Image (cartoon, rainbow, N blue to C red):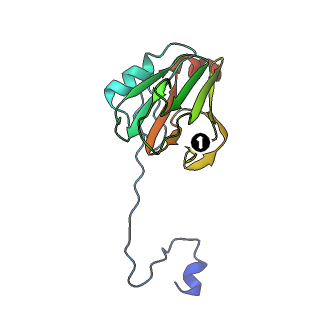
Amino acid sequence: MTDSESRSGGDAAIHRPGEQRHDVTQTFGHDSDLSFVPFGVELTDVEQSAIAALPSGSALLLVRSGALAGARYLLDTDVTTIGRHPEADIFFDDVTVSRRHAEVTRNGSTFEIIDQRSLNGTYVNGERVDRSALVDGTELRVGKFRLNFFASPVDRVAATD
């Protein structure tokens, strides 16, 4: 890049000899009465229907990777446990998951995840957290499992009124 290109207002792209170039395309979800698709999250019609049908005060976790990819977990209690312990509400039988890995708590129509001092940590949108609020499309990582969180659209509409 020449000095004059650097002053041109950013129209010139930096490309060094020998580097591979990548074009980036952003895809956004389509509009619908009840569907809200956060950036970067692709939902099947079945998943969109399941989210649209959620009653007030509930949410859904969609498993994106791991042995249970495609599974859906309803969050409709004040505390939902996640772990490798057979009595966990969401049971992930994998050594990357601690026996008592995390809890999802509900307060009214808001949810948060709380790490339970797990060995491998709990991640929200790629960052290790002890505790974090959950919003639509939030990506969780528990061990090698990746999940997306979605709240009831009834509560989303009520929050914007």
Q: Please say if 7 is above or below 63.
A: below
Q: How many circles with numbers are drawn on the protein?
A: 1
**In-front residue for pair 96/151:** 96
Which of the 4 image quarters holds residue 117? top right
Residue 57 x, y percent position in the rendering: 58, 16
Quadrant for the C terminus in the image: top right
Asked if one can make out residue 54 in the rendered structure from this viewpoint, the answer is yes
Q: Which residue is mark 1?
A: 118
Pinpoint residue 64: horizontal percent, then vertical percent. 39, 39
Question: Which class describes the residues within 10 Å of circle 1: few (<14), some (14-19), or many (20+)?
Answer: some
**Residue for point 55% across, 49% down:** 126
Residue type at mark 1: give it: Ser
Of residue 118 and residue 105, the one placed in the foreground of this image is 118
Q: Position of residue 101 (x, y in %)?
A: 56, 36
Q: Write the residue at 52% across / 35% down.
A: 99
Q: Secondary structure at mark 1?
A: loop
The residue at 34%/33% (across/down) is 70
